[in-house]
Image (cartoon, rainbow, N blue to C red):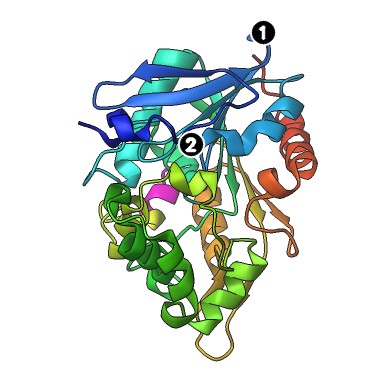
Amino acid sequence: MSYTEHPDRADVYVPHRFAEHSVDLGEIRMNYASTGDRANPAILLIPGQTESWWGYEEAMALLAGSYHVYAVDLRGQGRSTWTPGRYSLDVFGGDLVRFIDAVIGRPVIVSGLSSGGTVAAWLSAFAPPGQVVAAVYEDAPLFSSEANPEVGQSVNQAMAPMFRLMHKWLGAQWSIGDYAGMQAALPREIPGWLLAGLAQMAIESAPGDEVPQNLLEYDPEWGEAFASGSATLNCDHANMLSHVKVPVLFTHHFHQVDPNTGNLLGAVSDRQVERARQLVEATGNSFTYRSFPDMPHSMHGHDPATYVDTVTTWLDGLQISS
């Protein structure tokens, strides 16, 4: 039984602005929402880790006048099937290849935040030719979400301690569920350099009584898969980026390197983005960089108007047809 099918999960979810739908992709059922006119170009929005599709609600409304918009719950998040032991970039990417074929049915622009941005990178490299026409990597942790990256800090020098904390106190598939214990453990178990970065990335770090809705909809095994390296084990980022087939927009948000440890505060370092640029441009595709040094990790959540303006201005220059 998948965790989303457990009867005790029925009261977790809440209604949202756009109607939700489900499609059977074989191993999983994928939850999604859509809006806009099918006559317009299609865009697929891919949430970041701990985010369900509805994190894009405001951005979807702003995009709907010019695009046919889809936003999904990746497996292990939201109402999509939770799959213990089956969380990796290759698996996430394969799900979306099938989703695009089954639901969208035509070439699509992909835009993802954080881990979702890395999935967008996977699609821009490995989706069947012609399926993806352009890709937005919104503050994507290229290299920095790998255990042994070609360049820069690894996941263990970035977000891994937070992923391990959630997995320890909440448990795989929320099998423990001690949210209060997790909040109390933050100052003991998360190093100071990371706590400072989390605050500036606008990730909740203060104790609270209520579990955030997005966290209730997230399988903590997801983060553990990245912390352990299993999520990226068979998807070397340098190799992935050397196979990109479409134009890329990269938005880079708050980031610093801790002067005392050399660890990464933020999603991805300047050095790692520069290496991504080199690899993408070597394929003959463009890599457009936009810097937002004061922007929290989720631009589309914190400032949807700036996110939409940034993405649509870039897409207008590409002149993508429907």
Say the numbered circle drawn on residue 73. none
Check the image and report above or below for 51 versus 260: above
Mark 2: secondary structure? loop
Q: Is residue 283 visible?
A: no
Left or right, 82 with reference to 38: left
Quadrant of the rendered image containing residue 256: bottom right
Quadrant of the rendered image containing residue 82: top left
| Residue on which the image places disc 2 | 245
Extreme residue toward the front, this view = 209
| Residue on which the image places disc 1 | 39
Amino acid type assigned to the residue bearing label 2 in the image = Lys
Q: Which residues are magenta?
A: 239-244
Q: Is residue 18 visible?
A: yes
Can you give x and y, in whole percent of width and height, for residue 150 in the image? 39, 67
Can you give x and y, in whole percent of width and height, for residue 87 in the image? 29, 45
Quadrant of the rendered image containing residue 189: bottom left
Check the image and report above or below for 6 versus 41: below
> Disc 1 versus disc 2: distance between alpha carbons?
25 Å
Left or right, 282 with reference to 294: left
Left or right, 251 with reference to 142: right
